[in-house]
Amino acid sequence: MANIPVDATAFAVFEMHELSADSFDAGFRAGFAPCGGAGGGSVLASAVSGDLQPSASLAAWVAGLTGAFLRAQAVAGASAVQLFDSWAGALSLPDYARFVAPHSAAVLAGVADLGIPRVHFGVGTGELLVAMRDAGADVMGVDHRVPLDTANSRLGGRTPLQGNIDPALLFAGQAALHAQAADVIRRGATAPGHVVNLGHGVPPDTDPDVLTRLVEFVHTFE
């Protein structure tokens, strides 16, 4: 078991394998999500298939800002960075590859020289995992909809994974939450590396004590 301090951003870390480090402070930045605005996925889907086609200059601007922010966090001491794309899952694989992947690749390439792990995560992106990994990620974040052993198989068994406890179970009681955490850890063990995390963000009304007990469970699980 790796003895890795945890901060509030990456709330639980389990056996980093070849990603092992003395500490794990993650820098986060949204990717293509800002282009979706308040309408989220419906805006993105219409934007890439209809008359609202977003300009390449807007996407490039978002990518540039995102890359600069990630780089600043890394220079400030983050030992990993994550490109977090909330709305990529609203797109088909062809649309993602055409309209988003080039800009995500530019973001990830912008921190490639820093020698720290680059995590790429999206919501509802089970069908996009390979394309997102190939944009330049060292680690793929997986949301709670895809079992980690399935994700590992889709990625060819060569990519470390992050995830993917269902955030809804934070409110389901300790027994149910820890049972799923154990299942996630076992499935994650099929991958070459695994960072335990939620399969999305921490809901704002989560009891912090629930997270504390979950971290303790993960660090003591055998």
Image (tube, rainbow, N blue to C red):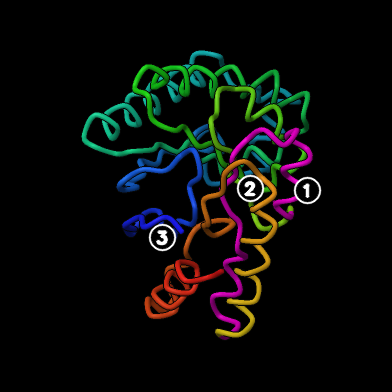
Closest to the observer: 35 or 207?
Answer: 207
Q: Quadrant of the C terminus?
A: bottom right
- Going by the numbered disc 1, the residue's amino acid type is Thr
- For the residues marked 1 and 3, what is the alpha-carbon distance in whole angstroms? 23 Å
How packed is label 2: few (under 14 Cα within 10 Å), some, or many (20 or more)?
many
* Mark 2 residue element: loop
Residue, disc 1: 150
Q: Position of residue 95 (x, y in %)?
A: 74, 25
Residue at point 49%, 13% (across, down): 57
The residue carrying mark 3 is 11
Secondary element at image label 3? loop
Query: Quarter-wise, where is residue 147 in the image?
Result: bottom right
**In magenta segment, residue 142:** no
Q: CA distance from mark 3 to mark 2?
A: 15 Å
C-alpha span from label 2 to label 1:
10 Å
- Vertical comparison of 142 with 81: above or below: below
Farthest-out residue, left: 76
> In terms of depth relative to the viewer, which is nearer, 96 or 134?
134
Q: Earlier in the sequence, mark 1 or mark 3?
A: 3
Q: Mark 2 vs mark 1: which is more N-terminal?
A: 2
Region rendered in magenta: 147-173
Location of residue 55 (image quadrant): top right
* Crowd class of label 3 (few under 14; some 14 to 19; many from 20; radius 10 Å): some
Q: Residue at x 77, y 29 (%)?
A: 93
Q: Residue at x 52, y 57 (%)?
A: 197
Check the image and name the residue furthest to the top. Answer: 57
The residue to which callout 2 is attached is 142
